[in-house]
Amino acid sequence: MTNAPHILVIDDEPQILRAIRTILTEKGFRVTTASRGEEGLTLAATNEPDLIILDLGLPDMDGVEVCTRLREWTQTPIIILSVRDSERDKVAALDMGADDYLTKPFGIEELLARVRVALRHSGRASESQSKVVKAGPITIDLVWHLVKRGEEEIKLTATEYKLLAYLASNHGRVLTHQSILTNVWGAADADHTEYLRVYMRQLRKKLEDDPESPQYILTEPGIGYRFIADE
Amino acid sequence: MNSAAMRSLSIILRVWQYALSFMLIVALTAIFFALREVLETTLIALLYLIPLGIITAFWGLGPGISSALIAFLAFNYFFIQPYYTFTVHRPTDVVILVVFLIVAVVISQLVGRAQTGLAAATARELEATQLYELSTALTGLHDDYAIAQILAKQVQAVSRGEYVELNITGTRPFAFHLPEIEPPNRPPELVVPIQAARGDLGEIRLWRAGLAISSAEKRLLQTFASQGALALERTWLAQAESRARVLEESDRLKSAILSSVSHELRTPLSTIKAAASSLRGKEVSWDSPARAELIAAIDDEADHLNLLVGNLLDMSRIESGALKPKREWNILSEIVGSVLARMRHLAVEHKIEIDMPEDLPLVPVDYVQMEQVFTNLVSNSLKYAPANTVVGIRAKAEDESIRVQVSNQGPQVPPEHLERIFDKFYRITAAERVTGTGLGLSICKGIIEAHGGRIWAENLSDGFAFNFTLPLTWDGAQPPRIPMDTEVE
């Protein structure tokens, strides 16, 4: 089991540490825990974990700062934990380089799904990106810029395609409004969330079976969007 | 009008009064002279007294006395023999002359004194009227700024000063200027402290060049200041009292929250405790269907607890005024869609119908808070409406706002409760029959009002509905135009 992914959990609440450690160990991961920010930073440097789960509300330092300090030297995926109503902090941490987030209290399937996605993206960063993303009947060919439902081609405008390609190549991960706007429209339009709202509606109309209750393009309230592809 | 001009005007008036008095005496002397042969000397002396009385009555003591002296000389010169001299030969004429002089002067003085007394009485009456006007204007005012405004206006009206400044100290010091310009570049002519029983509340500063401020005016302004002080003190006391009442109210509310919360929190906790302990023990066998049910109960009740805690946090945020919507231009149907996706497992017994026009404009709202509003309204509708009925969500754009209705086919609400269902902890049904903190609807109200909208409930012919409006403009800005591209890929 030495090849099992190594996860560092930084959280100051012993009960949460106990629960996460039990579950992740059960699922075959190696788990190290830290209850303070400084301790977490040291362990991240010495143990070289494959993934870091970081609580934003630490007693000794700001979680966003831990995130920033980690990103100074490592690209290890970071999943942040936080309570409801701290959207501002979550967005700050995500824009600082965190990969995903979970709102406490969370279900264990959610945690495992986030861990899987984060590990997959970090593994792929070194390899070549996947060229074709499948989501139900939808196929997105990122090389040929082709989007199909079954065999039928879906016509997209240039911006719609750019948006979908960005979402699909990061499938499973949350993408903040700012990161989508910057990547698709450019840094000058980073505040125009209304562009996103309107274009997402267009995309959903073309891709989703029921645009009012989407299955592939999910809204993360107050944070951004997430594209759900087949595993 | 400035005071220098007024002063010269009053001098001109005075000179004019003397001139008129003398002219009157001269005119009468001419008439008497023409009738000298007919009238007796004593009668002429008596007739002279009439104009003297009139002059004193109208123009005061000065013109009166001087007219009496002129009349005395004219009488002696023209009507006492020998004529055209000031000498007197007959002893009776001496008596007439002396009596005339005494009577004329005494009449002038008496009338003059009555006149002065009348003027003083009029001045006192004016003062009393002005004071009465001030105190009438000040009654019923509960705002220190309004009091300062009235006081400054009245001070300026009675003093005819060019500039009045009121400096009010106290917990929230401020200054009031009349007119609203910079004060003159010199020290004020008069400073009157506004004093109350518990000390200085501020001061009135009056600028008036020219006419010096008389002691009567100073006294009047002091009375004004103490009236103002009384009004200010009354206002501050009333404010302190209402603050105390608010504190008392919030104290009462806190204990209501505590008792409601401990009741509400204990219910899911009891379920979780019972389920978890029975799973831990030997009572439930591994393959029993009860096992799955107990686990589901723990999961559901944990979600329920989370919702309760969230509601409490929202409420405290609304109460403390910390609920600031983070507005962005949003599509309402996207918000509704994500709410319904999350609530799908709760709505299995009901049919949810959405009627939102495709071309509904973008609304400037906080996405997360509006999700909260829809979640609470829909879950409230699901809670009270019987199974197999329709819960409708409709939206339409009106002039400057968007109107949303969440309706259900549940029981109607007695009209007297329609307003109050948005109050905290307000329940129509007994608490034991329906779960919840009793905070959901008041949170909706808090959020909608923070967005500048309005929320109300109404009975429908076949059920009940919540309505709310949201403004379509954001700080005056209209919904933005989105640059759209054409299909090229």
Image (cartoon, rainbow, N blue to C red):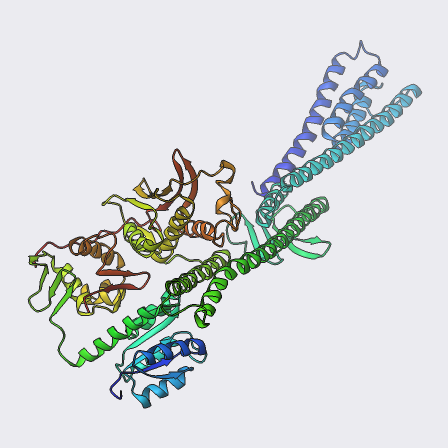
**Which residue: 51% across, 49% down?**
B180
Q: Where's residue A170, x and y in %?
A: 20, 70
Q: How many marks?
A: 0
In this orientation, which residue lies closer to the viewer: B269 or B195?
Answer: B269
Which quadrant holds the N terminus of chain A? Answer: bottom left
From the viewer's perspective, tell me whether residue A151 is left or right of residue A210. left
B122 shown above or below B246: above
Q: Quadrant of residue A55?
A: bottom left
Which residue appears farthest toward the right when viewing the image?
B91
**Which residue: 41% across, 78% down?**
A17
Q: Where's residue A131, x and y in %?
A: 11, 71
Does residue A27 appear anywhere in the picture? yes
Which residue appears farthest toward the bottom when viewing the image?
A46
From the viewer's perspective, tell me whether residue A42 is left or right of residue B194. left
B79 shown above or below B341: above
In this orientation, which residue lies closer to the viewer: A22 or B443?
Answer: A22
Q: Where's residue B93, x and y in %?
A: 89, 20
Q: Quadrant of residue B399?
A: top left
In this orientation, which residue lies closer to the viewer: A106 or A91?
Answer: A106
Does residue A13 appear anywhere in the picture? no
Which quadrant holds the C terminus of chain A? Answer: bottom left
A127 shown above or below B450: below
From the viewer's perspective, tell me whether residue A95 is left or right of residue A58. left
Which residue appears farthest toward the top when viewing the image?
B38
Q: Quadrant of residue B133?
A: top right
Q: Where's residue B409, x and y in %?
A: 38, 40
From the viewer's perspective, tell me whether residue B484 is left or right of residue A197. left
In this orientation, which residue lies closer to the viewer: B285 or B408?
Answer: B285
